[in-house]
Amino acid sequence: MTLPTFTEHALPYCVFSRGADSPRVGAGLGTYIVDLHRTFGDPIFAGPSLNAFMSRGPRAWQRTRERLLGSVRGGQIGELVPIAEATLHLPFEVADFADFYSSLEHATNAARVLRPGDPQVHRNWREMPVGYHGRAGTVVVSGTPVQRPRGQLAPGHARPELAPTRRLDFEAEIGFVVGVGSALGQPVPAGAFTQHVFGVVLLIDWSARDIQAFESRPLGPFLGKSFATTISPWVIPLAALEQSRVPPPAQDPEPLSYLRESLPWGLDIDLALSINGQVISRPRFATMYWTGAQQLAHLTVNGAALRTGDLYGSGTVSSFRHDEMGSLLEMTTGGRDPITLPDGQTRSYLADGDTVTLSGSAPGPDGSRIEFGSASGQVTGPAG
Ligand code: CA
């Protein structure tokens, strides 16, 4: 796999270890990791997660970033560890995990596949970022194998059987990572996005379409979505994405006031999806209808509290163009039209042994690119 190269404009955070060293917080620079504990001596970087640092809030994040940048430019970096020699761990303890459904193209494509007789996007979709709660304990770091899940499959009108999914799929997403929590009963306005959200990760929402299809009437998704969610080991700070901001698509009708933003958080992130190293699609995050700030406002409008380590997925990033779609469900029209990979193999859904990789980058200062690294998982056969 190609290793990322991070410019001084990116400086993404990670949790890494080398050899027998215990996991600690680092920052990506070039093809190296800056050991932040050994560089700054702050014990907050000595632990195996970003949570304590993230909970300090945006002023501390900014101070650390400026200090790090100053050290880089002054050639005063402490210990550097080659990324190639490091093990990268789950970068934060995931508190709650929710997943949205905020691409109009994805919602439209999915409705056409799943409800051909009633292919309209439901009327609530343009009024709020629709989402569901996932399972925080099944969020795993890139490189963790993804075991093909079992569940109740009921094609046609037959009684269900308990069997390994035959329709294993992925969804290409961005995940937003909450640093600063909020008080119970206090909704967070969309304008407070940067006061709470620390950064973003790449996110693969593994999905068992046949399990999902039978269990999701009328509630769901449930087990068909909550066996594994893969995130990248690098958390890109929001501060690195200032040059990546773009206006999101126009929203019609105008959303309710709690969902309005004065400076919307559209983000020009280019994604690339590959199966077994062969790129099959390049979804564009700039097309997303609802922004991360609107999703945060919606997530808390009922007074629910945020916690450090909360993670919420953007929803599948997709398109009406085949080469920009974010799931096999869409690319293969629900498995009916298999795709041909560059090596000539065909897929309706994933096969055991397949490795799915999501990578991404966004515009940075002076024509540079902010690299996101990658999130990757290999499908293994069912247990037992
Ligand atoms: Ca999803």
Image: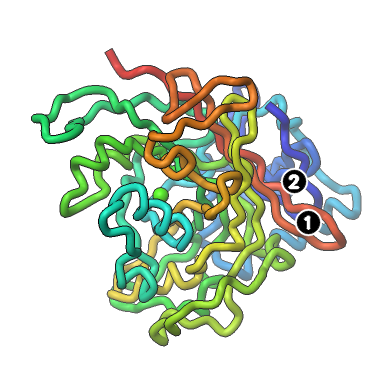
Q: Residue 253, percent across and down?
A: 42, 82
Residue with the mark numbered 1: 9
**Amino acid at the residue labelled 1:** His
* Mark 2 Cβ and ligand 1 under 8 Å apart: no
What residue lies at 28% left-to-right and 39% top-to-bottom? 224
Can you name the residue that lies furthest to the left here?
Answer: 159
Quadrant in the picture for residue 169: top left
- The quarter of the rendered structure image containing the N terminus is top right
Point out the residue furthest to the right here: 74
Question: How far is disc 2 from disc 1 in space, using C-alphas?
Answer: 18 Å
The one of 379 and 319 positioned closer to us in this rendering: 319
Left or right, 91 with reference to 70: left
Residue 40: % across, % down:
72, 50
Foreground tag (2 vs 1)? 1
The reply to whether residue 352 is in sight is: yes
Q: Residues within 10 Å of mark 2 (few under 14, many from 20)?
A: some
Quadrant of the image occupied by residue 287: bottom right
Q: Of the two numbered discs 2 and 1 on the same chain, state the one appearing first in sequence.
A: 1
Is label 1's Cβ within 8 Å of ligand 1?
A: no
Instruction: Name the residue rendered at 35%, 68% in the picture.
Output: 125
Q: Which residue is mark 2?
A: 39
Secondary structure beneath dot 2 equals helix
Q: Is residue 24 visible?
A: no
Q: Is residue 31 left or right of residue 165?
A: right
Seen as rendered, the residue at the extreme front is 117
Which residue is nearer to you in this view: 251 or 223? 251
At x 56%, y 61%, the residue is: 198
For badge 2, the amino acid type reads Thr
